[in-house]
Structures are given as C-alpha cells and as structure tokens.
Image (tube, coloured by chain):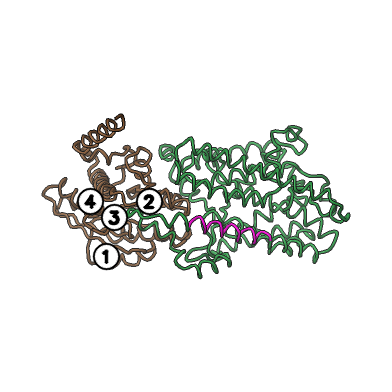
Amino acid sequence: MRMLVALLASVLLLCATAHAEDIGECAVSEELIPTDRPLPHVVEAIAAKRLSIAVIGTASSTLRAPENAYPAQLAAELKRRLPGVAIELKTHIEPSGTTAEMAETFPKLLAEDKPALVVWQTGTADLMLGNDADSFRDSLEKGIAALQAGGADVIVVNLQYSPRTDPMTDAAGFANVMRMVAEDRAVPLFDRMGIMKYWNDEGTFDFYSTTNDGTTNRVHACFGRLLADLLIGSAKPGEAKAGR
Amino acid sequence: MTTAVSAGRDIRLDVFRGIALWLIYLDHIPYNIVNWITIRNYGFSDAADLFVFISGYTAAFVYGRSMRERGAIAAGARILRRAWQIYVAHVFLFVIYLAEIAYVGQKFDNPLFAEEFNVFGFLRHPDVTLVQGLLLKFKPVNMDVLPLYIVLMLAFPPMLWALLRSPNVALLGSAVVYVVARHFGWNLPGYPLGKWYFNPFAWQLLFVFGAWCGLGGAKQLAGVIRSRTFLVLALAYLLFAMIMTLAGHFPRLAQLIPPFIDRAVNPVSKTNLDPLRFLHFIILAGVVVRFVPRDWPALRQPVFRPAEICGQHSLEIFCFGIFLSFAAHFVLVQITNRAWMQIVISLAGIVLMVMMAWMLSWYKQLDGRAPKPVVAATERPLAGGTA
C-alpha cells in the first residue's frame, strides 16, 4: 500500500514538472554560460536581419533524427527569440573527423556558406583516435584563426561529459585544452562538458545510463537553448537571458 | 666516483616513492573528489615526475654499484632483465584492461554517447590492437608510465656507463637530447594517431637527472639547497606555480593573472616535460630534501612505514594501483559514484596497496630465510627496493 502511494505521488510529481516551464530542466549555473566574449559579425548580421550559421562537428553533433539534434534546436530557438531575423543554419557532420581534418574543409565552408558564425564542435574524434593534446591544441588554434581570418565569428563546443567512457580517455584534458584555446583567442566556449557534468551532479539527467532512456532528445533540446543563450548573450550583453 | 655511492639506504626514497604511488592511484580515478589533495593541483609537476626521478635515482644506485663491481656487461644485462620484467608487467595490465573494457563496452547502448562508444572501437580489430599493444604503440589511458619506464631502462646501460665515467658530461648529453628533441618535436608514435603521452626523449632528462643525483650529484647540490637565497627563490617559484595551476581550476582567479604572464607560461606541456615543469620538480625536491633530512628520526616512525614498504615494491605496487584504479572505475559506474563512495574507494585502494606491499615484504623475508649463496646478499639493493 505504501508503495502504491509513493508511486502515485511520484507520478503526480512527474506530471507536475512536465507541465511546468520546460526550460526548467535545462537550467545551469550562470558561470557556465559566460557572455563576455564578443561576436561582432553576429551583431552585424542580426542588425542586417539575416544571420547565417554553420555548425561543423563530429557524430555527437547529430542524432538519428537530425531535427532533434542541437543544431536544429538552436535554429528553432533563434527563430523564436530573434523575430524578424532570417536564420540560416547549415550543419556539416564529419562523423569521426579530427580537428585537423575539419580545419581542412574551412576554406570551402567559408566560401560556400559565408557564415557570420561558425559553431565548431570538436575534440571527440581526436580523443578516440588517441591524438596527443599538443597536436590537438595546435590544430584547434590554426582552425579558429582560419575561421576568424575568413570573416566569421566562432563558438567552440567542447566534448561531452561521458562518465562511463571518460576514464578510458583523457576527455577532461582535451576539454581543458579547448577552454584555454578559446580563452586565448577570445572566442566563446560552449562548455558542453561542464554543463553536462552540472546536470549530472544536480540529478537533472543521468549520464551513467547505459540504455536508450529517452533523454537524448531532451538533452539536445537543452543544448540548443543554452547555445542560443550564449549566442544572444554574447552578441547583446545587455539583454535578459530568456532561456534560463 | 667510487666514493660517491654512499652507504646505507636513504629511507626518504622509499617513503616518497610510496606516496607518489598512492597519488598516481588517486589521480587515475577520474571525477574523484579525493584527487583534490594530490600535488598536481598545486604546481606544474605531479606524482609522475616524482616516480620517474626516484626510479632514475634508485636504478643508478643499484645498477651503478653492480656495474662497478662486476663490469658493464653484467650490469647492463641485469638492467635489460629489469626492462623485460616491466614489459611483462605492462602486458599483464594491458590484458586486464582489455577484459574490463570488453565487459563494460558490451552493455553500452545510450544514443547520446554513440560517438564516445568508439573508445571501444579497438575491440572490433583485436588483431591490430593486440599487436600495437605489444609494440607499445597502442596505450590505453593511464597505461603510459610503464612504456616510458621500459624505454628508459632499455637505454640505460650506456647512459649509466657514461654517468659512472663522467657524470656531468653525461647529464649534459641528456640535456642536449632533451633540448634537441623538444626543438624538432621528436617523439615515438602512438596508435591509431598521436604520439607518446610521456615523450621519452624529453622525460629521459628527469630520469637521468635522478640517476645523476643517485650517483653523488645530490651532494654537489647540497650547498645550494642549504642556502637562504635558494629557499627564498624556491618558495617564490612554488607559490607562482601554485597560483598559475589553481587558476586553471578557478576562472575567477585566472582573471586576475595578467595575460602576458598567462601566455608566457601556458600551456605547461606534460608530454614534452616543459622546462617550467622540470624546474618545478627539482625545486620542490630541493625544498623537501632541505626540510626532510636523510637522518630525520620521524621517518622511522610507524606512520611512514606503509608508504615506505609500498615504495620498496614499486613496480608491483604501481601495477596493482593501476589495476585498482580500473576496479575503482568499475565500482563507480556499476554501483554508485556518490562522494562517500569516492572517498571509500580512495582509502580502500591505498589500504589494499599497503596490504599487498606487506605481503610482498613477507614473501621476501620467507625467501631471505632460505639458505642462499652469499652473492644474493650483495645483489640486494640498498635503497628503493628494486629499481
């Protein structure tokens, strides 16, 4: 009987949270979305009412249904929050592309998409293939410099927090390299690892789960929202951060 | 140089190597709150530097004596036998690692981490993985120290010969290799990509420096270490290194550091043993040696005994620690990763390491009791157990 009551109570609680504002579960502490690094080309593009964004990343930047993955979620969020601005977002997935390999595609990407902003998710393939942190750092610096020289702003997205596999790799070390390089080059960092770790510690999502527990789409939706927070916050530092 | 090898064991070597082994164990458990206490968070160098330095020191001490007494060929052969033992230990750990990963990987089906799942990719090509592992090219994370140690030992016979002949010239030669290798980016290749995490061409400097100290170089430095100027400069540098390292963890602190200093210092490469890192280690060692004299009575207190016996069986305890860190990971992902469990696992691992060391000492006593030719007694190392 007591079990039943407990079960009922938790079901009710679940319903209640589901009905509350969905943004709730994406919430992270403010310092995880620092908005003090400028995005001048994005500011211009928003003023011109036409913002083109290229997302380039490895397999973790997409899902089996790409419309659920964070790039599409970011586009949807921006359309909602920047009414009147045409949002063009293109996604380029290099499933196991290393940082150096992705950087090779940049001249073509810049020429064809002419993006005001490139969201560059990288690091995971380098890590999986056992690349060393020094070469990784070097490729990352060169890649960011190439994008900036090509007239685009850059947001770098670091690795996922994956507690089951991280002990088998130096994921934290690679994420740290990305933090340092982003700081050096004064580009905003979307600290995916820090954000996921925060959620995991808060109990928002259980990243220890080994099975398809249905949270994947929600996690990506949150990435999309928080990326929009980072983008809008960095481009217009005064604005209220609606996503949180 | 015959006078240089001092008689009697330096208990500090065993104690600090034992502590280094514990810290390496703690550092190898990711997302463990206990590894906040390890020295890597408070300066450029960490337990790995200490381990390599002491390994060089004891190797020179043990095999230097052997080389002087029985000649270069016999001592060289013993060093190579040691390298072989380390290689066998590495392969043993490699197999345990593969077994654990294969088990964990088999039950993993979370689409969010489809990409991270590729870390198990090597299981799809066991033919290549095993061969690359045996060639020391494929080294899973945390399994980088022993390959470094193997390569350092393989190259050690001629280096030891040179160190015995002319220690300062040999050390200079090592420094030249370090500088040239860093300049030209020499390193051994990894598999499938990348290079060795511990670049042997760079890290050999720390090993040779340890050997140089073990053969009497430490005495040459004693005057410097005792001077007041050294102490003031050393403490200033250690403080600086602490601030710079802590800034990596605390963005608020990082904001206070002028960008030009940050740019001049970071990144402090571990792979290529950054000069700042090397300097940090030798300064730290100098300060410790100054305040913990060789004959400090407290070192004989029972409280240091667990660290000492761990240090005496360093290879076995190192391997056991790596195994325990896999086990700790397994417990944290399969049972719970709560903070209390992290603390329990950290303490339990250290207790198990001490128990293992105790057992090894006991075995050694058993062996020692058996009637043995006199030769065995001279072969027993005086410091640092086996190198």
Which one is earlier in the sequence, the residue at label 1 or at label 4?
A: 4
Looking at the rendered image, the disc whose residue lies closer to the viewer, 1 or 4, is 4
Give the quadrant of the N terminus of chain B.
bottom right
Label 2: state its secondary structure: loop
**The disc numbered 1 marks a residue on which chain?**
A
What is the number of the mark on residue A74?
4
Q: Amino acid at mark 2?
A: Thr
Q: Do tags 3 and 4 sit on the same chain? A: yes
Residue A84 position, x and y percent, is: 11, 49
Q: Are marks 1 and 3 on the same chain?
A: yes
For disc 4, the neighbor class at 10 Å (few under 14, some 14 to 19, many from 20) is many
- Name the kind of residue labelled 1 in the image: Leu
Q: Residue at x 48, y 46 (%)?
A: B30
Q: Residue at x 35, y 67 (%)?
A: A104
Q: Mark 3 is on which residue type?
A: Val
Q: Name the residue that disc number 3 marks.
A: A119
The magenta stretch is: B85-101
Q: Chain A appears in which tint? A: brown
- State the CA–CA distance, disc 4 to disc 2: 27 Å
Residue B204: mark: none
